[in-house]
Amino acid sequence: MVLAGQMMDRPLLVLPLLQYAAAHHGDSAVVTRSVEGPVHRTTYGETYERVQRLAHALTRLGIKPGDRVATLALNTWRHLDLYFAIAGIGAVCHTVNPRLPADQLAYLLSHAEDRLLFFDICFADQAAALVAGVPTLERVIALTDAAHAPTDGRFGNLLVYDTMIAREGLDFPWPEFDENTAASLCYTSGTTGLPKGVLYSHRALVLHSFAVAANGLASADDILMPVVPMFHVNAWGIPYTAPLLGAPLVFGGPAFDGPRLFDLMETEGVTCTQGVPTLWQGLIVEMRARGHKPKDLRRVVVGGAAVSESMVRAFEDEFGVEVFHAWGMTETTPLGVINRPKAKFKTAPRDRQVRQKLKQGIGVFGADLRIVDGEGRAMPHDGTAQGHIQIRGPWIIKSYFKEDHSPLTADGWFDTGDIGTLDPDGYMEITDRAKDVIKSGGEWISSSMLENAALGHPQVAQAAVIGVPHARWLERPLLICVPRGEPPTLEEINAYLATRLPKWWLPDALECVESLPIGPTGKILKTKLRERFKAIRLG
Ligand code: AMP
């Protein structure tokens, strides 16, 4: 019989992360480019005070453990308050992506049965539509001060955040509860059907914060600026990990463009930042225009989509900013894999180093990975066998909110829907989404590797590859690109790609377009491209 350990059974809860920061790093800064305009400065000490006041206000509004409270908000100090106060009283912070279409927003709030909605004033129109369309919604609160609150009467009895919490006192009697209680809720982006709710437990979020800190996405001597939105998978956990480390936080609010990102990073001395590749393209343009990087920037974490070779070379070779490639998904809280070079690659020739950096990385402790074939059989970790990537661990989804059937395999793994390889050094490389991979004859061609290779061509600004029907091979790649300057020909592109990829991968057709359709989380919408080019038949 096993012998029980004799350590305290203290629950892993989210609020103590902030309480720790307030007690030990109380003067660490939380700086925001506010939605109202000016830069706003606060500290962890003051944040914890506001969080206590907000907890009183939420309780006064009738919010009870288990209730869902929606936020329609950017990265700001007020959104940080909400993360901790809502979870702290045992309720659930439902972060909603304001860029979704109105009908999807209404669906999400109705599905979650949100009772309150907190909104940034730049999303007043979306919030007003939700007041009318979501029956469970009782009150809406504008995340601003009295001077900037909407006055147009569309919200019924509107509350104003700063005024509301100023009326409340400190010393909230925080409840203690089971660590498996839900703390936050985020829906998948729903590119393949209705969005599904992922309910993060306190335990998962705390363990995930340790993993984020242990794997270099953030460290105690950093000034952190998550550019990934707080409405998308908890901004990759940075709002929880930064207080755990006592590290200062910088929030961009509405600033997503290169010039404003650069300015904030420069003036606030940001050292480490996290976001998707589309955002970094704007920052690189700005760095080139000014001829230097934001002065203290050391590290950029790139995830959500694959980093391209040209992006790695721009950050690292032109500006001396290190790139950490990372992979995860809404269902994995999100950190699953991060690419930090093993010692042996640090001394490898530069081309070899860059090649290795394009892989998504090594599974972090706590997130087990495997690749399997279509029948669920384990595949070799040889860096070439492509299979379905499956994952399990304490911050990986077990079931979707309000769905009965389990999304797991019979032996308890979550199938990510991604296709990839694992190499003998432990590095995972995503070669495609299962639904995007191009099935040419009996073989798979990776659309994302083709896209990344095409992006290296000087006349290609943006690239997307989809499979189109082919008489002999069933499917062949069509390259769709936004040209940089003179549009390239298929022959020119293929001459370039032929030195980098297997010959049989090269696209059979090329379409040049003015822009690519981008979804609300910054990813290319291949469904739209398939629809637009559905008439193309090859062979
Ligand atoms: P989401 O749940 O919206 O965050 O999307 C998760 C999906 O984004 C993953 O399943 C991948 O298909 C994709 N993804 C995330 N990170 C990367 C990466 N570093 N490289 C390639 N694809 C990625």
Image: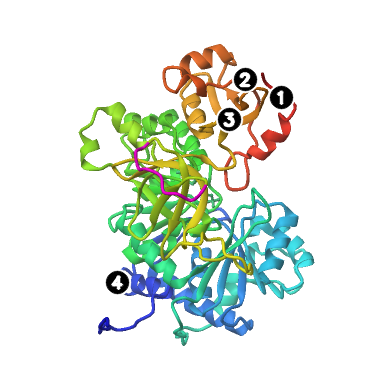
Q: Which mark is residue 536?
A: 1
Q: Residue at x 72, y 31 (%)?
A: 532
**What is the CA distance from the residue labelled 1 to the residue labelled 2?**
9 Å
The stretch of residues the image draws in magenta is 375-383
Judge whether residue 377 is colored magenta.
yes
**What is the CA distance from the residue labelled 4 to the residue labelled 1?**
62 Å
**What is the CA distance from the residue labelled 2 to the residue labelled 3?**
10 Å
Q: Secondary structure at mark 3?
A: strand
**What is the CA distance from the residue labelled 3 to the residue labelled 1?**
13 Å
Q: Residue at x 70, y 74 (%)?
A: 139
Q: Amino acid at mark 4?
A: His
Label whose residue precedes the other's in the sequence (4 or 1): 4
Q: Which residue is mark 4?
A: 24
Marks 1,2: beta carbons within 8 A? yes
Report the mark closest to the observer, 3 or 4.
3
Q: Which residue is mark 3?
A: 465
Report the mark closest to the observer, 3 or 1.
1
In what quadrant of the picture does the N terminus appear? Answer: bottom left
Judge whether residue 433 is colored magenta.
no
Q: Secondary structure at mark 2?
A: strand
Marks 3,4: beta carbons within 8 A? no
**The one of 36 and 529 positioned closer to us in this rendering:** 529
Q: Amino acid at mark 3?
A: Val
Mark 3 crowd level (few <14, some 14–19, many ≥20, 10 Å Cα): many
Considering every residue shown, the one lying at the far bottom of the view is: 173
Magenta stretch, main secondary structure class = loop
Q: Is residue 354 above or below residue 265?
A: above
